Amino acid sequence: MTLINKGTAYWQSLDRAHHWHPFTDTKGLNQAGARVMTKGEGVYLWDSEGNKILDGMSGLWCVALGYGNEELIEAATQQMRDLAFYNTFFKTTHPPAAELAQKIAEVTPEGLNRIFFSSSGSEANDTVVRMVRHFWVLEGKPEKNWIIGRKNGYHGSTLVGASLGGMGPMHAQGGPMLANVAHINQPYWYGDDSGLTEDDFGIVRARELEAKILELGADKVAAFIAEPIQGAGGVIIPPATYWPEIQRICQKYDVLIIADEVICGFGRTGQWFGSHTLGIQPDLMPMAKGLSSGYLPLSAVAVGDRVANTLIEKGGEFYHGYTYSGHPVSAAVALAAIRIMQRDRIVDRVRDDIGPYFQQQLRTLADHPLVGRIDGIGLIAGIALVENKTPKTFFKDGDAVGLACRDHCFNNGLIMRAVGSRMVLAPPLIISRAEVDELVAKVRHCFDLTARDVGLM
């Protein structure tokens, strides 16, 4: 069934009357009217007015294989015909869930051999908390239940996900947050005025974890959770010294490492996972988004042998799960997506070809008066907008500048996300060199428009 084009105003009226959007000032949106997307193909979207837009954010970090992939569509269609749904409760499985679990274990870092399915990154992180705390109970250490995250980290928007993350505006709504969760500072060197070298800064920020462990009591801390590269926090890539020191500290105090790969996973950084890229050895790895290329909701937790063996051998029934855990159609699509990535060597292409080209071309923007610093690896990047390069001066109202830039992008055929005054990009992994050139040209044009708004051009 194809929706009849009833016109933008019609869909906006329905949306205004009934649709409550996530992370949105609904009052403001209703006054302006929502943008209505109607079609996608490759790296492009079309809205209801016929405007063609280059999607520099892969939907929401997730459409790795681009829009309109017929193999993924066929995988969903065939699975719907064969078995549209059955649950994985009550000693039951089905081929897509079993085969996908094996395939995920094949591409994750060594030792992550058990896969638990859910529907979203938030649900995956809820699952992680249940597993981690139950693990320590079974190990005879029930008091070891504190989890440490990072300020400006993002792990979803459920109560548990918001609690694990360190975003103040989220904590201000719907509290109190989950008990026994603490946070340390993020490793954002460019945004800091410490005067330290980048390597020294990485060590100092990592050692905040040790200080927090000692403050809470080493016998009380269960796990540390962090994204290899912060995504929704603005694409913050930590200094090279950061993760090795984090691992040393966690090993010293027997603290589990949770690497949240919801954004970094499935080729985004030029390796299968950000943990591969940054040399992290996680005990648990939540993932989502690129797992199914965003075509259907699906997430998973890859569980290391130490944790899995204790939960399985000592735990009996695990009283946790979701109706759609391992949904057969979602699993079939994800299985097809991973097989396409392996067959077409897409991860290798991100690492060796299109990722380096994307980073190279982005850095041609370094001469722009708005651009303070460009960070990125593979097909993910963050660009800090500044009022002045030397001395480094951030805008007093960076949020407003970022939103103005984002709006210029939408109005000029590009989707680029604003996180405060950081502009972030994560295009589909199938993007071509010509499309990268088009993206960078559109970014420069929109930076010019923004610079004129703030009097820099």
Image (cartoon, rainbow, N blue to C red):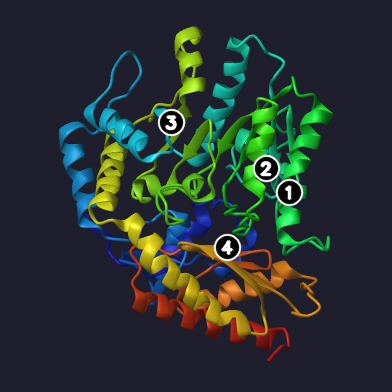
Which numbered disc flags the more N-terminal residue, 4 or 3?
4
Nearer mark to the viewer, of 2 and 3: 2
Front tag of 4 and 1: 1
Describe residue 115's horizontal placement relative to residue 416 as left or right: left
Relative to 359, does residue 324 appear above or below in the rendering?
above
Q: First in sequence, mark 3 or 1: give its number.
A: 3
Question: Residue 65, position in %: x, y?
Answer: 32, 57
Residue 30 image label: 4
Residue situated in front as seen by the camera: 421 or 174 = 421
Give the image quarter of residue 48.
Answer: bottom left
The CA span between labels 4 and 1 is 47 Å
Q: CA distance from mark 2 to mark 3?
A: 22 Å
Mark 4 or mark 2, which is nearer the start of the sequence? Answer: 4
Mark 1, residue position: 203
- Name the mark nearer the viewer: 4 or 3: 3
- Dots 4, 3 in contact, CB < 8 A: no
Point 46% across, 56% down: residue: 269
> Mark 3 sits on what residue?
112
